Image (cartoon, grey):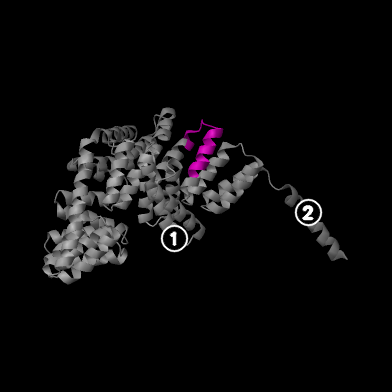
Amino acid sequence: MAKRTLLKISLLLFLPTLCFGEDAMTLYQRGVSASEGRRFQEALNFLEKAITLDPHQAKFYHRKGLCYRGLERLTEAVEAFERSISLDSSQSIVFENLGVTYYEMGHYKRAIPPLQRVITHSPNRSLPYTLLGAAYLALLKNQEAQEALKKAIQINPKEMRARHYLGLYYARERSYQKAIDEFQKALELQPNFETEMNLGYVYFQVTHYPEAEKAFQRALSMNPRDAEVYYYLGRIEEKKRDDQSAIRAFQTALQVNPNHLGSLYQMGLVYLKTGKVHPSIPLFLRVIELSPGHIGAHYNLTEAYRQLGKVEDAAQELNVFEELSRIQDEIDFVARRRVWEFESPETQAILGELLLKARRYPEALNAIQSAIASGKEDAETYHHLGLVSMKMGKTEEAIQALRKTLEVEPDHLGAHRTLLLLYTQERRHPESRREEEIIQRLEQQEK
């Protein structure tokens, strides 16, 4: 009997916790504690409960956004930060985190307004200027990037990242000695892998190979599992005319990353120039499989087939090479003639279409997404987005883009045909049958 009484008392003591729980602020504090311990999913559970009890606290959503960033769920992080701002737009730290998140997503243009807002409220902080400069640099707005980065350094001469990005700016402008100076200053402030790599790359560009090799070796000591380091060490061995050492370096890069494009291609070139034609062919074929628009691989595969007397294969590859070269000329022409409006949605859409034809799918995707983000939302642009997404194996994204095409232009025959192909591949039979019927109707109308 005593044990039963004790059990009842224990249950009664526990019931208030089950019924009433903790208040929103306590749950929020528990979420903060969990997130500071990098237990982000646990933190999100507490924060969701806190928001359910009190959905009007801006800091709850800000912390939620930080947790999503910790989990690399960046789209959800943006939504949380924007919700926080809608409740309280006075907190510049939220704008800063929103800008950083957009930058991490590659949405550089969207990163700029929140970072500018931070600078307006906190003009004496170096970090927002650094991030703004990095965003401008990614958008090829070199003058704006230089101004922002120099301002960051003026505020804080020890802002390592600002010096790193300023080095990238000078490298892009081919002011190589200034780039070297900035990279070296950044490394004095904080040795790091990325800056050593870029320092090595600049030394390589100006043919200072001993200095380049030292920089890459220092980078290698920081990260021995990076294929790019071995690739450049291999390139340096090529410059020394030590083909065997070059091949060993490229092989090591491919052990780290079997799909490292540069190492596959350069190793193929070394084999081809040293008369080892047969082993060069699978390397060039692999490059083309990974990057169908790689002009150099098509050209050198043509040469390899020619040397082996494979006339038909050589002719086929030559045709592809000439077509890709023609498209590249068009891309260069558009970039030159429209340089003053290079970032306009119309120019980005044109480049996206050309890059799609050139089989350079990641670049095409970036250009088309940039065009759409800037307001170019016509049927053809969405159709091209669907095609490039399909080529990259992003089936659901392709279907979404093609549906957007049909919202703008319901009778777009190309979009219906591509949807039929995707639905058939995915065995979505009802959708496939519906698309077949629509295509038959549209083809009849064309006749």
Tell me the distance, in whole angstroms, between the alpha carbons under discs 1 and 2. 60 Å
Q: In which quarter of the image is residue 273?
A: bottom left
Find the residue positioned furthest to the front. 447
| Highlighted range, magenta | 77-94
Residue 180 seen anywhere in this rendered image of the structure = no
Q: Tag 2: Cα neighbours inside 10 Å, few (<14), some, or many (≥20)?
A: few
Could you tell me residue 44's position as x and y percent? 57, 49
Q: Main secondary structure of the magenta part?
A: helix
Q: Depth check: 232 or 378 in front?
A: 378
Residue drawn where x is 42% and y is 28% of the image: 120
Residue 344 seen anywhere in this rendered image of the structure = yes
Q: In which quarter of the image is residue 264?
A: bottom left
- Number of numbered labels in the structure image: 2
Report the residue marked by disc 1.
Answer: 424
Disc 1 residue type? Thr
Q: In this view, does 110 lie to the left or right of 241?
A: right
Q: Nearer the N terminus, badge 1 or badge 2?
A: 2
Q: Is residue 414 above or below residue 235?
A: above
Disc 2 residue type? Leu
Q: Depth check: 280 or 59 in front?
A: 280
Could you tell me residue 296's position as x and y percent? 19, 57
Of tags 1 and 2, the one toward the viewer is 1
Report the residue marked by disc 2.
Answer: 13
Q: In this view, does 363 lie above or below 258?
A: above
* In magenta stretch: residue 340: no
Could you tell me residue 191's position as x and y percent? 31, 50
Q: Depth check: 443 or 114 in front?
A: 443
Residue drawn where x is 12% and y is 66% of the image: 306
Q: Is residue 427 left or right of residue 22?
A: left
Quadrant showing the N terminus: bottom right
Q: In this view, does 5 lie to the left or right of 344?
A: right
